Structures are given as C-alpha cells and as structure tokens.
Image (cartoon, rainbow, N blue to C red):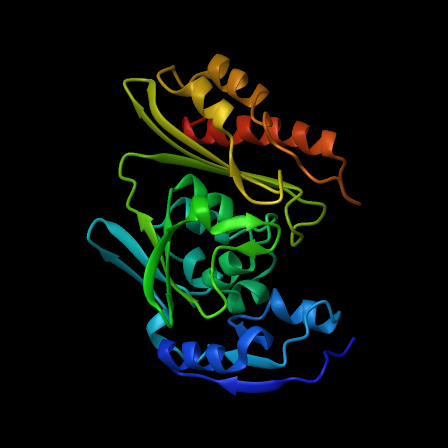
C-alpha cells in the first residue's frame, strides 16, 4: 500500500529535531531507520502529517566507553552493534535481528522508542539494567529501561522528546546467553530470552533474565531469577528456574503461537540461555 500524504523534514541536530517536533505537534513523527514506522505508514496504521528524518544527526551515532558504562548513540545501527567485539549479549542479539538489510538500517533508538515487545533488544537491555537519555524542550532526563515501556507500542517518552543515548553498564564478570524462537529466521521472535549471570565459585551471585513477547511490554523473569540467586548454576537449578520462567507473564496468543505454547517456549529457552551462560 501507499502511505498517506505527509511533509518531510531532514534535521542535522537534536535541537533541530526537538524544534520540529514542537512545531509539528502530535502529527509529527521521528524517522530513524524506518523499519518500524514505514511499514505502519504503508498500511496506514500510522499517518503522520510531518516526518522528521534524523539520519543526518551524526552526534547520535557510535559506541563509546565512558565512566564505567557504554554510551550507545540512538542512531547506532544494529549492524554496528552486531560487529562490536565488546558488547557481548547486545551484539549477539543484534546479530539475530531480521536480516542484514534490516540490520544495516535499523537503529537501537528506533527499536526502543517503538516499544514493540517482540523486538530483540528491549529484553536484552532490561536484563542489563540499562538506561536511556531523552532530550526535549524541557531539558534532558535519564529513564531506566524498566520504566520506559508502559504498554504495547507505548513508552514514557513525551511527544517533544528525542531518545538520544543508551547507557549500558560494563557488566564485568557477567556471562550471558541469548535464545529466541521464530517461525522463520528473519521473523519477529515468538519468544526470546536474554540472560546475564555472575557466578563465583560455582554459585550464582546475580542473575537477570529478560523476556521478549511474553506480555504487552518486555519484562523480567523474576521467579526464575529468585530461584537461582545464591544457588549453584547447575543442571538441577537451571531446570528449576526454567520451570517458573513464565510465572507472572501474560503472553498474547496470535497466529503463530498460543499463549500456552509461548509459556512452554519461555521455559525451554530460559533453560538453554542459562546453560550457555553457565558455559555449557
């Protein structure tokens, strides 16, 4: 299908983007890589009167280490994340997003601001306890990713705010695992699981487990985390954690999988991701 008529404006700075958002009001939309917004526009599920292209904002591109954390510009592409030798879990998840064409254009900021619970990176960043930086007419603020997503395709960003940066803790001493199940390799995940674990002398000191597509927002598998903390990261305890991975979730049934099947997948994939994190 063909999108509805819209005006187009290309900006080269965050300040210019904020100004354009203010002028366009509720009928303005930011365009990053376009792989979330443009398909909705073609289906006319989104019909912005003004499309603000952020592709020229160079300051929002790239990865840097600063003050004990990684600073990732919001316009950093999935392909750039995928090629990083230092981002571990984030790089592994980015490498599984759709296909290479999508990874070459799609951005981390666009993925997070879109708020789709089936996306790969939100659950990963939830497990990492990352933060995002947003800038608007009222100034700059930091938002924990655990507070960013409020409902399906709904975030805590205000209409005049631009997501500018993702701050990722360095997470020294953590091992990781990532698993997702799809109908086809390039599809959205039916379910995805991201694991970060810190093990000392065989005992799990800390573990974080993020779940994809198990509710209207990404969420943590808190029951599974509680089952593992202070316990050996061995087959017995991994199985116990996997058995409760879906506790407290409300996965949506759809054409690809029932809610019951998604709960089953959450347990299986949690077990696999934990096994990877344990070195198995």
> Is 119 rendered above or below residue 212?
below
Q: Residue furthest left?
A: 67
The image quadrant where one finds the C terminus is top left
Q: Position of residue 99 (x, y in %)?
A: 60, 59
Q: Residue at left 41%, top 36%? A: 176
Is residue 141 visible in the rendered image? The answer is: yes
> Is 186 rendered above or below residue 61?
above
Q: Position of residue 167 (x, y in %)?
A: 33, 54
Is residue 86 visible in the rendered image? The answer is: no
Q: Residue at left 38%, top 15%? A: 232
Q: Residue furthest top?
A: 236
The image quadrant where one finds the N terminus is bottom right
- Along the horizontal axis of the image, is 95 left or right of 27? left
Q: Quadrant location of residue 75?
A: bottom left
Q: Quadrant location of residue 100?
A: bottom right
> Is 64 rendered above or below residue 193?
below
Q: Position of residue 74 (x, y in %)?
A: 41, 64
- Count of numbered labels shown in the rendering: 0
Q: Nearer the viewer, residue 62 or 116?
A: 116
Q: Nearer the viewer, residue 250 or 171?
A: 250
Q: Residue at left 33%, top 35%? A: 174
Q: Quadrant location of residue 6?
A: bottom right
> Is 200 rendered above or below residue 259?
above
Q: Residue at left 26%, top 39%? A: 172
Q: Nearer the viewer, residue 164 or 264?
A: 164
């Amino acid at each position: 299908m063909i999108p509805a008529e819209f005006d187009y404006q290309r900006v080269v700075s965050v300040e210019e983007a904020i100004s354009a958002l203010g002028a366009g009001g509720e009928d303005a939309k930011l365009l990053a890589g376009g792989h979330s917004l443009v398909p909705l526009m073609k289906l006319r599920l989104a019909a912005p009167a003004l499309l603000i292209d952020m592709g020229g904002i160079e300051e929002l591109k790239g990865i840097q280490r600063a003050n004990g954390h990684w600073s990732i510009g919001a316009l950093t592409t999935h392909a750039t994340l995928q090629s990083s030798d230092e981002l571990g879990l984030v790089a592994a998840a980015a490498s599984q997003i759709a296909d290479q064409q999508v990874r070459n254009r799609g951005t981390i900021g666009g993925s997070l601001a879109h708020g789709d619970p089936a996306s790969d990176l939100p659950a990963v960043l939830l497990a990492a306890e990352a933060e995002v930086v947003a800038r608007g007419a009222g100034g700059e603020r930091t938002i924990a990713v655990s507070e960013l997503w409020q409902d399906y395709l709904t975030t805590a960003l205000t209409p005049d705010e631009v997501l500018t940066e993702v701050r990722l803790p360095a997470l020294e001493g953590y091992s990781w695992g990532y698993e997702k199940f799809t109908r086809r390799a390039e599809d959205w995940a039916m379910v995805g699981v991201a694991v970060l674990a810190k093990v000392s002398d065989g005992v799990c000191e800390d573990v974080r487990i993020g779940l994809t597509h198990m509710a209207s927002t990404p969420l943590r598998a808190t029951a599974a985390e509680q089952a593992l903390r202070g316990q050996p990261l061995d087959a017995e305890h991994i199985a116990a954690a996997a058995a409760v991975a879906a506790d407290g979730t409300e996965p949506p049934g759809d054409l690809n999988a029932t809610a019951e099947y998604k709960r089953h997948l959450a347990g299986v994939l949690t077990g696999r991701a934990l096994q990877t994190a344990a070195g198995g």
